[in-house]
């Protein structure tokens, strides 16, 4: 039996974010899947947060080291995108980053 495949929460994917408007983050870059697996399995869209190597001292940016590259998860740039924008899967974020993301989202939306 073939197991159905869908993007998993906290997985990192290369996502094509173009075209963009205004101050939206652009280009194809690694992004963290934020939406829960139940949504990822059932919908044709996913909720993502892009990653960057540009460091800002902002409370809504979560530090991350992924594939030996230091950067931040940009929770100020959360987007819903079609799964068609997802390119290559690139692993998952660490437990520490998962916790940081969830704590920051709680602070942002509580």
Image: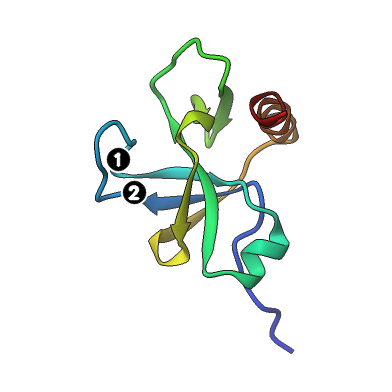
Q: Position of residue 104 (x, y in %)?
A: 67, 26
Which colouring convention does the figure follow?
A: rainbow
Q: Residues within 10 Å of mark 2 (few under 14, many from 20)?
A: some
Quarter-of-image position of residue 94 = top right
Q: Position of residue 27 (x, y in %)?
A: 28, 43
Vertical order, 11 against 64 (above or below)? below
Answer yes or no: do the residues labelled 2 and 1 have beta carbons within 8 Å? Answer: yes
Q: Looking at the image, which residue sits at the far bottom?
A: 1
Q: Which residue is mark 2?
A: 17
Identify the residue at image location x=51%, y=26%.
72
Helix or strand or loop: what does disc 2 sit on? loop
Vertical order, 4 against 88 (above or below)? below
Residue 3: mark: none
| In the displayed structure image, the side of residue 77 where residue 34 appears, left or right | right
Query: Where, quadrant-wise, is the C terminus in this rendering?
Result: top right
Q: Residues within 10 Å of mark 1 (few under 14, many from 20)?
A: some
Quarter-of-image position of residue 95 = top right
Quarter-of-image position of residue 1 = bottom right
Q: Position of residue 102 (x, y in %)?
A: 72, 33
Q: Which residue is mark 1?
A: 26
Q: Looking at the image, which residue sits at the far front?
A: 110
Q: In this view of the protein, which residue sits in the foreground, 95 or 22?
A: 22
Count of numbered circles on the image: 2
| In the displayed structure image, the side of residue 23 where residue 31 appears, left or right | right
Identify the residue at image location x=59%, y=61%.
7
Helix or strand or loop: what does disc 1 sit on? loop
Task: Answer with mark 2 or mark 1, whichever residue precedes in sequence.
Answer: 2
Q: CA distance from mark 2 to mark 1?
A: 5 Å
Identify the residue at image location x=63%, y=63%.
40
């Amino acid at each position: 039996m073939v197991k159905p495949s869908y993007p998993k929460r906290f997985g990192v994917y290369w996502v094509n974010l173009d075209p963009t408007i205004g101050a939206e983050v652009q280009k194809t870059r690694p992004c963290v899947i934020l939406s829960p697996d139940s949504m990822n399995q059932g919908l044709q869209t996913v909720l993502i947060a892009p990653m960057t190597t540009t460091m800002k001292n902002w409370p809504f940016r979560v530090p991350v080291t992924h594939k030996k590259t230091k950067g931040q998860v940009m929770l100020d740039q959360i987007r819903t995108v079609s799964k068609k924008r997802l390119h290559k899967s690139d692993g998952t974020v660490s437990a520490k980053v998962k916790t940081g993301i969830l704590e920051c989202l709680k602070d942002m939306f509580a």
